Amino acid sequence: MPRLFWLLALGLCQFSNAAQFGSCREFVAQAGTDYDYIVVGSGAGGSVVASRLTQKGFRVLVVEAGAPGYPMAAQAPALHGVGSEFAPIALDYGVQHFDSADQAHRDPKFDSKLAGILYPRGEGIGGSTLVNAMISVRPMKGDFDAIAQLTGDASWSDANMLRYWTERIENNQHRPVLRGLHRVGGALGLPFLRNVGGHGFDGWLPTSQPGWDVLYETLVKDAQLRRIVLAAEKATRGRTGSIFSLARRASTFFDPNDSRAVNRREQGLTITPLAVSQGRRQGPRNLLLGTLAAHPQSLDIVTGALVGKVVFEGPENEASGVEIHFQENALGSDDEPAGENQGTLTVRAKRGVVLAAGTFETPKILKLSGIGPREELERFDIPVRADLPVGANLQDRYEVSVISQMRNPFKALEKARFATDSTDPVFNYWRTSGKGLYATNGSLISMIVKSNPRLEQPDLYIFGIPGSFPGYYQGYSVDSTRRKDIFSWVILKARNENRGGSVLLSSSDPRAQPDIRFRYFQEGTDTAGLDEEAVMNGVKFVRELNRAMDGHILSELAPGTGITSDAQIRQWVRDTAWGHHASSSASIGPVTNSRLRPHGTKKLYLADASVFPRTPGFFIAVPLYMMAEKAGDMIAEDGGQEP
C-alpha cells in the first residue's frame, strides 16, 4: 500500500485515544524490515537517543507501552502530583523498601493492595518526564569523573559531559545577561563569551526560575511565606559561616547550575531551575515530537506496544529486533485495566536495539531475553545467553518531610483548587496566560547543605512546599492540597551509601511487573547506617529552622512532638522514608561496557537511568539527558557515522 496510508495509520496510533492497534500492527509489519534502530521507551533516555539517531540520518522506530495523550495535568507544572495519579499517564508500581515484613508494615504508606509502597511512574510519549517535578539541576562535581575512572574511558569525564549540557541540552531562560554574552560571543567569534557560567542557551530543554508574578504572589503578598524564606536564609548562613556566603550565592542569582556554585560545592539558599517555558512543562516529549515533525520519513513512534524481549541471532548474541505485544495499558492498573491483547509481532532492526525502558523495565526485558543471573533465569526456564548481574545494585534517594501546621492559611493558596477545570480560577489564569502559581512546581525556596561538616560536598537538598507531602500513596495528590495551612520541608539525601537493592523477575510474562526490592538502610550495603544518620541530621537542621519562626508554627505534624531523641528520629526515618529516583539496576561496569553495550552481546545498547554505577547528582533528570546525548553519539559511531 502507499506509504501515505501507513503514515496516516501510525498517526492515528500515536495521537488518537481510540484503539488503533490493528493499524499500528499492520504498519510495523509493513515498514519494519528497514529500520536501522529500534528504541524501546520514549522517556528521558529513549526520546533523546531516538531523536539524535534520526537527526544523524538513521531510520528509527520508537516503541512506547503507554498512550500518546498529553492531558492538562501533565502540562501545568504545579499539577505534577495530579498527573502522577491521572490514570491515562500514570504507571503505578508497588515496591518493597524492606525484605522484613514487620519493618515494611511500620510505614503508614504501606498499601496491602499493592503489596508494598506506591512508586509512581509515567507512561506515554515522554515517559516519567510527563509527571516529574521538572527539576533541572546539574550533576555534582565528580559524578561523571567517577565513571571515567571506573571504565578508563576519559570521554565520560565531567569536562566532556558538561559539553552536552551547554551545547545541546539547556536553553536557559533565567540568566539574561549570560544569554546576551553568549549571543555576542557567537556573533563576534569569541568563544570565551559563549556558555558563560556553565549554561547553555541553544539546546532543546528550556530552563527557568519562577517569574516575578509568582514571587509577588508568594513572597510579597504572603507574609508567612516570606518569614519562612528569611528563616531558611538565616539557617543556611549559620552553616556557611558569614554574610559573604550569601553574597556569593546572590552573585549567581541563587542558581545551583552556575559553574561557580558547582565547582565550589557551595551550601546555601538556592532557587531550583525547572524545565518550564511560558508557564508550561517542557521535556524530552517536545524534542521527540519536534524530531518527528522535521523527519517524518525517518522516525516512527508506536504507542500501546509493550516489548517482551530482544531477539538475538548467532552465537555472539547479536541483537536483531524485538518482540512487541500490542495491547493498550499492557502493564495494567486498578484505575485503568489492560485493553484487549491484539497479538505479538517481531520487528527487525539492521543496526541495533536500544533499551531505554527505565530502571525497572529494562532489567526485566534483559532477563526475559536471556541476559541476567543464571540462577534466576533458569528458575523461570529462560535460556541463558549472558550470565550478568542484571537487576543488582538498585539504588534510590531517601526523602522524608518535616510537616508543620502554620498559624494562618497561606494567602497564595487561597483560590487554588489544584483542578483542571473552569471551577479553579488559578487554573483558568494559568491556561490563558501561562502565569501564576500553576506555572511553578510548588517549591518556592530550597537549601543545599551538608549533613555532616566533614563531607567533601553537600548531600542534602531541602525544599519547601506549601502543603502536606509525607510521600507517595494512593490519593496523596488530593490530600497534599486539602488544607491551606500546612507546610512541608522535604529533605532529600543524595550520594547514598546503600546500593543493595534489586529488580527481580516475578513471572516470565512480560506484562507482569517485576519484584522491586530496595532494601533500605541497614538491610542493604550501608551496614553502618550512614544514610540514616544523614537524614536524621537533616531533620534536626529543619527543626532548628522552624524554631526560629517566631510563633508562625502552631504544631509539628511529622515527625511529631513525641519524637525527640536521636534513636526515635532514626526509627521514624527508617519507618517513613521514600524515594523516586531509582537507578543503577544494569550499571556500567558489571553489566555494560563504557559504550553502554551489555557484555556478551552485540548491537544491543542501554540508555536509561539503569546504567549509572551510582545515582548522580541531587536529581536524576539532567545527568540522564547528558548520558543519553552521549549514548546517541556512541551508537551512531558504531552504526557508521563520524563522531
Image: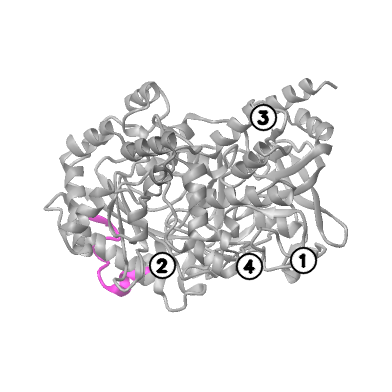
Magenta span has 310? Answer: no
- Discs 1, 4 touching: Cβ within 8 Å: no
Outermost residue toward the left in this view: 550
Could you tell which of marks 1 and 4 lies nearer the N-terminus? 1
Q: State how far apart marks 4 and 3 are (Cα).
A: 35 Å
Estimate how packed mark 3 is, as few (under 14), some (14 to 19) or many (20 or more) residues with alpha carbons within 10 Å: some
The residue under label 4 is 589
- Discs 4, 3 touching: Cβ within 8 Å: no
Report the mark closest to the observer, 1 or 3. 3
Q: Is residue 81 visible?
A: yes
Q: Give 238 or 132, whichever is nearer the viewer.
A: 238
The residue under label 2 is 574
Q: Is residue 222 above or below residue 558?
A: above
Q: Amino acid at mark 2?
A: Arg
The residue under label 3 is 295
Report the mark closest to the observer, 2 or 4. 4
- Identified at 45% across, 60% down, the residue is 397
Location of residue 95 in the rendering, given as x and y in whole percent from the top left corner: 55, 58
